[in-house]
Amino acid sequence: MKKTILFLMMTLCSLGAATLDEKVSYLENIKELVILTQEMRGDTNVYIKGGDVRLSKITDKHEVVAASLRELRQRFETVDDQTNEKFNKLNTYMISLNEVAAELDTMTTFRAYSLLINEMIKLGVKVQSNFFINDNKRRDISSVMMQDILPMTEDIGRVRGLGAGMAACNQCNSDEVAFTKDHFTNVSDHLEKLVADMRRLNALYPNSYPKNLEKQLVRYQVDVKRYIELMKSRLRDEEFGQVPSISLDSYDFFSHGTSLIDHTLSFYEMNELLLKGQ
């Protein structure tokens, strides 16, 4: 018991010693890692399905993701040893998956990358909570960044990767249909929570956000829902064996999803500025 308390005190002291800029940079690094892995997962899915993605592009993305993971490990003074060890394990799993990803069936690969991304986000939430454990305002702001905004990028990223892969081969199997349909509820729930929490923060700190934030949130909701409806329509056609009523172009669908993720990240950037006290 005494050892546990001592370890906890040492961890909190270590976290407290990190500067605000170091903490913000660490969270930014996690966000970057999640976004890069989402892109790699989508490109890999399109490639496996015979889409217009070169293997060299995926290999290059492997290197970029690996560099992002290395950068996290080099920030060891910012977080506790236990968290660093978990990121080390993620790095090991990522290397192993990258080596065999193109040889596995599409859904096995897609699910494996998705599990890794979920673990990254979970670690990000834990780190964020520990960073600002004694700062209510920054804990509130950073929780929206890591618990609302980052998961929302993953929701859109999954639909983007699955839809682009489907467009690449003009069909999907029943496993893909079920996996995608199960995911729609998460998208809807996370979307409503993100918008509600952004409105709450705007009410608490009205001078810290753009004057047109409400318009941005409404536009964002509409755009995300339209993107999801496009995917739902295509899946309905797949289920009933109909000729697709809506044509999906792999590149355009992926690009549209990327634009939505960029819009999602604009809310992250707003909060990051507030986190820094700007």
Image: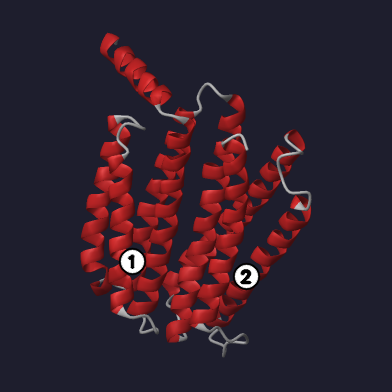
Identify residue for label 1: 61
Q: Which mark is residue 263?
A: none
**Residue 199 in picture, x, y percent from top left:** 73, 44
Say whether residue 186 is visible. yes
Identify residue for label 2: 227
Seen at 58% across and 31% down, the residue is 138
For marks 1 and 2, the one nearer the N-term is 1
Q: Quadrant of the C terminus?
A: top right
Give the secondary structure at mark 1: helix
The answer to whether residue 250 is above or below residue 203 is: below
Bin the neighbour count of mark 2 within 10 Å (Cα to Cα): few under 14, some 14-19, many 20 and up. some
Which of the 4 quarters of the picture holds residue 10? top left
Q: CA distance from mark 1 to mark 2?
A: 25 Å
Bin the neighbour count of mark 1 within 10 Å (Cα to Cα): few under 14, some 14-19, many 20 and up. some
Q: Amino acid at mark 1?
A: Lys
The reply to whether dot 1 and dot 2 touch (C-beta < 8 Å) is no
Q: Amino acid at mark 2?
A: Tyr
Q: Is residue 268 left or right of residue 77?
A: right
Indicate how the structure is coloured in the image. Answer: secondary structure
**Residue 89 in picture, x, y percent from top left:** 25, 45
Q: Is residue 274 left or right of residue 73?
A: right
Seen at 58% across and 67% down, the residue is 259
Q: Is residue 60 left or right of residue 137?
A: left
